Image (cartoon, rainbow, N blue to C red):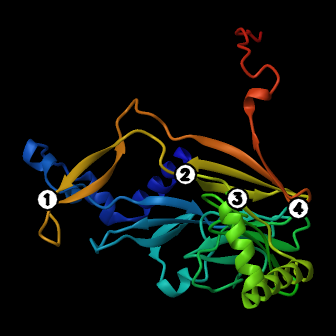
């Protein structure tokens, strides 16, 4: 990463006389200058990344002192930095993403939608456009599908015909239990008498049971699993499609958060700024769980059971 910044800085300083001159200008540093807006330093390039063919460096820059940085590019041979138009940016792949094994296609998520970029043809294709936030796209093991996530739901998108299949759904909290038979003898007697005396209630109950069994027998239900008071940080399908790994974090874990008041607000009232807990406070719990789709089970991975997990090895010297 440091090498990228060095190359980018050298290219821009060599190619831009204006920037070079402003950099070479002697500044008198005093407390007043240092404490004012950092704009006196000049605009500095940020977030550099390579093009897919390695011939161009893209970076964000604001030499015009606009409200926000803009995307620029410069060739590895030098030259003048060139501003990239908004229209052209839409046709460019994202700086991050995942590649297939042949390194000819790139998958990435942008603004909640999933795109695939053909590196040979230099063509970008949007796979879906929805109001949902599709994230974490990956190629399936056979590279014929795209596995992606929408919240706690995991989907498979076929690159052949565009069909979408939901694989699993993970929810926080506990599963809502079905109404149970009353344990109290008096309540049990009253319910039994009520159903026997009122024929309409008995028929209605029986009809619900028959409809429920018919739905379960005739539908291929998407498995749903509950993980208690945890939120999903990451979920991933195994190459063989049988398992789903879940990295979870406790929702209300950690120590008490500090309160930072914000006095300069649009509402005119003092508002609280969300802040972190104090250093050394209690950390939120995390855990790893695995869904076995074939066995329809969910289990927790306990590192305590790993052999010699608590064994402290002595330092060794390699000569």
The image shows a total of numbered marks equal to 4
Q: Residue furthest left?
A: 32
- Picture quadrant where residue 279 is located: top left
Residue depicted at 13% across the width and 66% down the height: 269
Q: Which mark is residue 69?
A: none
Q: Earlier in the sequence, mark 4 or mark 1?
A: 4
Q: CA distance from mark 2 to mark 4?
A: 38 Å
Q: Earlier in the sequence, mark 2 or mark 4?
A: 2
Query: For the residue labelled by badge 4, is the local secondary structure a helix, a strand or a loop?
Result: loop
Residue located beneath label 3 in the image: 185
Query: For the residue labelled by badge 1, is the local secondary structure a helix, a strand or a loop?
Result: loop
Residue located beneath label 2 in the image: 4
Q: Which mark is residue 241?
A: 4
Contact, CB < 8 Å: mark 1 with mark 3?
no
Front residue of 34 and 126: 126
Residue located beneath label 1 in the image: 263
């Amino acid at each position: 990463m440091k090498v990228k910044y060095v190359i980018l800085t050298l290219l821009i300083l060599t190619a831009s006389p204006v920037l070079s001159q402003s950099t070479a200008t002697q500044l008198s540093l005093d407390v007043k200058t240092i404490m004012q807006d950092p704009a006196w330093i000049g605009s500095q390039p940020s977030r550099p990344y390579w093009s897919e063919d390695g011939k161009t460096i893209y970076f964000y820059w604001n030499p015009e002192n606009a409200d926000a940085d803009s995307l620029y590019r410069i060739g590895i041979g030098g030259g003048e930095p060139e501003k990239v138009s908004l229209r052209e940016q839409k046709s460019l792949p994202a700086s991050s993403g995942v590649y297939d094994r042949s390194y000819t296609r790139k998958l990435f998520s942008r603004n909640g939608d999933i795109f695939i970029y053909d590196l040979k043809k230099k063509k970008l294709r949007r796979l879906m456009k929805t109001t949902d936030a599709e994230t974490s796209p990956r190629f399936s093991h056979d590279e014929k599908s795209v596995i992606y996530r929408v919240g706690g739901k995991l989907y498979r998108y076929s690159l052949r015909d565009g069909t979408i299949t939901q694989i699993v759904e993970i929810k926080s909290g506990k599963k809502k239990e079905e109404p149970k038979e009353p344990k109290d003898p008096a309540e049990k007697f009253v319910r039994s008498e009520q159903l026997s005396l009122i024929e309409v209630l008995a028929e209605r109950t029986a009809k619900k049971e028959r409809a429920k069994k018919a739905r379960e027998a005739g539908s291929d239900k998407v498995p749903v699993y509950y993980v208690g008071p945890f939120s999903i940080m990451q979920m991933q399908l195994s190459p063989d499609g049988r398992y789903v790994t879940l990295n979870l974090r406790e929702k209300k874990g950690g120590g008490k958060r500090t309160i930072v008041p914000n006095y300069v607000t649009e509402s005119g009232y003092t508002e609280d700024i969300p802040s972190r807990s104090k250093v050394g406070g209690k950390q939120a719990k995390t855990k790893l769980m695995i869904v076995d789709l074939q066995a329809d089970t969910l289990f927790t991975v306990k590192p305590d059971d790993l052999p010699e997990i608590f064994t402290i090895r002595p330092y060794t010297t390699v000569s």
